[in-house]
Amino acid sequence: MSNKKSIVDIPTVNKIARLARLEIPEKNKQNLTNDLNNILEFVAQLNEVDTSNVEPLASVTGHKLPLRSDEVTDGNIEELVLKNAPESSSGFFVVPKVIE
């Protein structure tokens, strides 16, 4: 990493972890902080690339994939999926309230 100012520090990692409901061991926080700063630095480098004369594209080959019709289904695996839930009710996962 260059000597640019770090954007992410350990308090920021703590806040992100709290918001994402993740428990990050103290010994991993510095490495995670470094990794996040490296990622953000790389994204900043990508933002510096002049793409004003580059035509946006969705496929490099120009071929379009055939689309299928949208059909709403339950996947026929509701019982299998809900079997993994600690608690379910009326076909839905029951989770703790996270917004007060």
Image: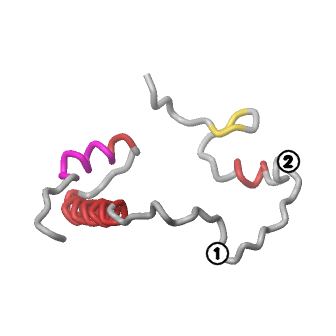
Q: Main secondary structure of the magenta part?
A: helix
Return the residue at label 1.
60
**Residue type highlighted by circle 1:** Val
Q: Is residue 9 magenta?
A: yes
Judged left or right of residue 81, residue 35 is left
Quarter of the image for the C terminus: give it.
top left
Residue 53 versus residue 62: which sits nearer the camera?
Answer: 53
Q: Element at badge 2?
A: loop
What range of the chain is rendered magenta?
8-16
Q: Position of residue 10 (x, y in %)?
A: 18, 51
Q: Write the residue at 45% across / 64% down.
A: 51
Q: Which residue lies most toward the front here?
A: 53
Q: Residue at x 80, y 54 (%)?
A: 77
Amino acid type at mark 2: Thr
Q: Dot 2 corresponds to which residue?
A: 73
Is the residue 82 above or below the residue 66 in the image? above
Say whether disc 1 or disc 2 marks the residue closer to the N-terminus.
1
The quarter of the displayed image where residue 44 is located: bottom left
Quadrant in the picture for the N terminus = bottom left
